[in-house]
Amino acid sequence: MSTAPFHAAPFDADRADLLSPEAVADPYPLLAALREHDPVHWSPRYRSWFLTRYDDVDAALRDVRFSSDRIAPYRRAKLDRPGADAGLRYAFGVLEEWMVFKDPPDHTRLRKLLSRGFTPRAVAGIRPRVEQLADELLDAATSSGAGTLDVVRDVAYPLTASVIAEMLGVPRRDQDDFKVWSDRITGLVFGGLADDGRHADGASGMAELTGYLADLVAAHEREPADDLLSALISARDEHDSLSHDEVVATGVLLLFAGHETTTNLIGSAVLALLRHPGQRALLDADPQRWSAAVEEVLRYDGPAKTVARVMAADVELRGRTLRRGDRVFLSPSAANRDPAVFEDPDTFDIGRRAGRQLGFGVGLHYCLGAPLARMEAAVAVPRVLARVPAQTVDEDRLRWAPVLLSRGMERLPVRLHPDPPGAR
Ligand code: HEM
């Protein structure tokens, strides 16, 4: 990964663009320049603020004035008027039910109920199944004799999609449809709010997915099973439970949150270890270090490039005023390479203590799926690496997704080990 200065000439913050081809391929030089020269950056291009210093990102993620309620204002401004697209209004209505887009007290209520269904114990119990799925996918992908493997498309993506679909209780025969709908709503969530054609596709994907889930929830209401949907339906405290619509919307959230980001983590972990054979050798010598390695990948090149907020009040920060209603992007990727917190931050070092990394966020909205994501990565990455020799990344065909919020590859082609595992 390049650590060259972003500009030899003086840094021109107004021209900074995280979606330029160079910054999509490697955002870290630009994020470093912003962190150093313009840590509370107003982007005319995105009409948004960008915060890049660790202390600012950490504080803002814990500060309710940086509101998560960012879907409802958009819906009210753009979709609650005559002639607005009804499908899109429906799709944004589902997103509005997601707790990740809510502030207290609505967020507190949903999080409490959801946490009851989504426990670390439930995650630990499925590890053997994740191992089996990963082996099956790798066997299928490597038996073709093609000699190459696309880590993202052949393994990470189908693995994480199947795991969350199975956890929810989606029958295997329906899982392909499920993945297609989920892909289509990606544009709505990660594509930002600009309508560039992905919205219509996303809206129809949302309608099909929620229609499917509503039937599945109804079936689970009649006949509970040992899965996450049934746990959500029965999740209740003394006063409260989730409504049918909330269970459906939460199913979409978990499906969505559960697979795109974890796919990106698995891809980034494989890439980092292929590019750093010395670190990979440390893991070969001591597999106990895998959890530290996953943590370091989350710090060094994690999937959460930015997290969006909307200002609920005016806030002064480093001499700038963030006004109520302004959009703000908080960058865990930038914070995680802040030299004020991490020594030698551009170095990938599985021996460091990366515990303070912000790759799963922090505060009220701290990622609920962190134990699942860590486990899936710790299962998948060593299995992939067991089948690929050193230095085999096809760098010319590797492609990063041009997305502001997340950092992940669309393709990670690698050459395969000539011998099957066991023959070495
Ligand atoms: C490496 C993989 C993952 C990364 C990097 C990641 C990252 C994040 C981040 C940064 C947030 C905070 C968002 C915010 O503050 O606005 C978040 C929240 C969330 N994540 Fe994850 N996530 C991952 C995997 C998962 C998985 C596997 C699931 C579940 C199946 C999941 C479910 C959630 C949920 C439900 C929230 C909302 C929590 C709340 O609003 O209280 N995530 N995630």
Image (cartoon, helix red, strand yellow):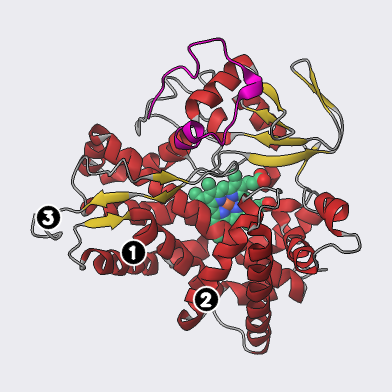
* Residue under pointer 2: 177
| Amino acid type indicated by mark 3 | Pro
- Mark 2–mark 1 Cα distance, whole angstroms, equals 20 Å
The answer to whether 272 appears left or right of 259 in the picture is: left
* Residue under pointer 3: 418
* Residue under pointer 1: 134
User: Which quadrant holds the C terminus?
Assistant: bottom left
Q: Is residue 87 above or below residue 365?
A: below
Q: Earlier in the sequence, mark 3 or mark 1?
A: 1
- Mark 3–mark 2 Cα distance, whole angstroms, equals 35 Å
| Amino acid type indicated by mark 1 | Ala
Residue 340: which numbered mark, if any? none
- Mark 3–mark 1 Cα distance, whole angstroms, equals 20 Å
Label 1 Cα neighbours within 10 Å, binned few <14 / some 14-19 / many ≥20: many
Q: Nearer the viewer, residue 122 or 424?
A: 424
| Amino acid type indicated by mark 2 | Asp
Q: Position of residue 280 (x, y in %)?
A: 25, 39
Q: Residue at x 33, y 46 (%)?
A: 397
**The residue positioned farthest toward the right in the image shown:** 82
Label 3 Cα neighbours within 10 Å, binned few <14 / some 14-19 / many ≥20: few
Q: Is residue 287 above or below residue 334?
A: below
The answer to whether 375 appears left or right of 281 in the picture is: right
Let me know if residue 192 appears in the view. Answer: yes
Chain part drawn in magenta:
1-26
Callouts 3 and 1 close, C-beta under 8 Å: no
